[in-house]
Image (spheres, helix red, strand yellow):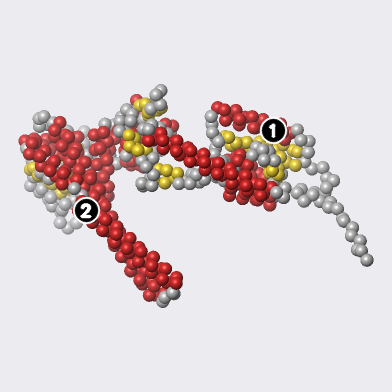
Amino acid sequence: MARKVTMIPQTINPLTHLPNDAVVKRKVAGYARVSTEQEEQQTSYAAQVDYYTKYIKKHGEWEFVKVYTDEGISATSTAHRNGFNQMITDALNGKIDLIITKSVSRFARNTVDSLSTIRKLKENNVECYFEKEQIWTFDGKGELLITIMSSLAQEESRSISENVTWGHRKRMADGKISLPYSSFLGYRKGADGLPEIVPEEAEIIRFIYRSYLEGMTTYSISKELMRRGIPSPSGKEKWHASTIESILTNEKYKGAALLQKSFTTDFLTKKKKVNEGEVPQYYIDESHEAIISPEDFGQVQLEIARRKKLGKQYSGSSLFAAKLVCGDCGCFFGSKVWHSTSKYRRIIWQCNNKFKGQQLCSTPHLYEDEIKQRFVNAFSVFFQGKDMILETVQILIKSLFDTSALDTKIEKAIQEMENTATLNQMHIQNNIVTAKNKDAFDKRHDELVQQYENQKSVYDKLIQKKIDRQNKIKQLQQLVFQLEKADNPIGTFDENLWRIMIDKVTVFHDNKMVFQFLDGTEIEA
């Protein structure tokens, strides 16, 4: 006997949770986005906003919420799309029932972002409609179509990213440079497309370089710039020491350009990393007008290296800092101010340890004028042997250039590190295959790790030794340049010669001063 089945129709709308006969309008929002700020794209942006406003309002059963927008922002990630993120927040808070946008690619070019967002919206009874593809996300086929369309959009983003990257690298290979002018102090884009000097900003750059060579630290320079009310490259009141260091090490200020210092590792996340040889770099000499001379730029790089080697011993008070050494204890001399509030104010230099410890240093204090005059005297003696010194320095530079023995040691250290790493990997793998006693495993593992760390320490010291040799070569080349340029001994103190020529000055208890020049020559003055 056939059973009698009676269907009881639904009375509640599953989307609104209200009775079917209730007159409820769907709250509808539009989403418009363009990925560049070019004029034609801005026109498209305005047209999208106008179109979706009218489109939503003409449907009587819909209630217009607003058109959310993002202008000039890429779609590969939703992380920085403020309009998009606000729209999703409002939708999850019940302010939107339906989102309408032009296409899947307008919504997101990242498959993961696209699907996770749509599923989150579906769980909260919010539907999306993609007009171009005619996809309604509550449709049974919606998610499959969205997955396919999002994947295609993501591949399109990959293709665009690769084309853009190729274009950038082609311009680099052709020697064409561009700067982030809005936050790059000293230059603006010229009529020919090349960097053009901004005179008033160039003076700030020169002040930074000059102050550093006069002995100031990056921190004290940043403090002085803030005291003068000079805005940072990004237009802010605060300067950071790292900003000063970046300016001091940027080769563009000497009229050259090193291109592709960093590169994008992932087109979706836009994550960048410092280029350590993974992709080609391009160095262009004399690519544009220089603000800082190559000689001054080179001196700054050597001074940076010198201060890093000194570490905390460098006080940064003047160009005499970390140059004067106490003959009694070996510590540096530091500056002190006498009679700071009177007309007899004087700056003197004395051993930083003079009044510390049980054994007081007997070395005298020195006035700056005395240091300068003694340097002039010492340089006059040094200059008399100019020809022989130049010949000796050239031989020294040639010997420093030969790093074959050092390179062999570096290669050996690398090989030892690789062998130890391989042994540790085998040790771990063997334990996976055949479990061993935990204590025995840990002991051997720790031994191999310690062995690797010791080998790494040797490798680091060898690399630093090679860097020190390269810096020494640069210093000696500067010395040769200055000596060849000089025709006569100097009559007055020359800051430039002091920085380049003098390695250190040892001060003894009997007021004797021994000037050690960069080539190793020692002259008593």
Front-most of residues 132 and 466:
132
- Picture coordinates of residue 273, whole percent (x, y): 42, 46
- Left or right of 523 in this view: 198: right
Q: Residue 387 is drawn in which quadrant?
A: top left
Secondary element under disc 1, as helix, strand or loop, is: helix
Q: Which residue is mark 2?
A: 406
- Left or right of 214 in this view: 376: left
Residue lying furthest top in this view? 191
The numbered dot on residue 53 is 1
Residue type highlighted by circle 1: Thr
Q: Residue at x 26, y 52 (%)?
A: 463
- Picture coordinates of residue 278, whole percent (x, y): 38, 47
Residue 227 seen by the camera: no
The numbered dot on residue 212 is none
Quadrant of image for the C terminus: top left
Q: CA distance from mark 2 to mark 1?
A: 72 Å
Tell me whether circle 2 and circle 1 mark residues in contact (CB < 8 Å). no
Q: Residue at x 68, y 52 (%)?
A: 123
Front-most of residues 144 and 516:
144
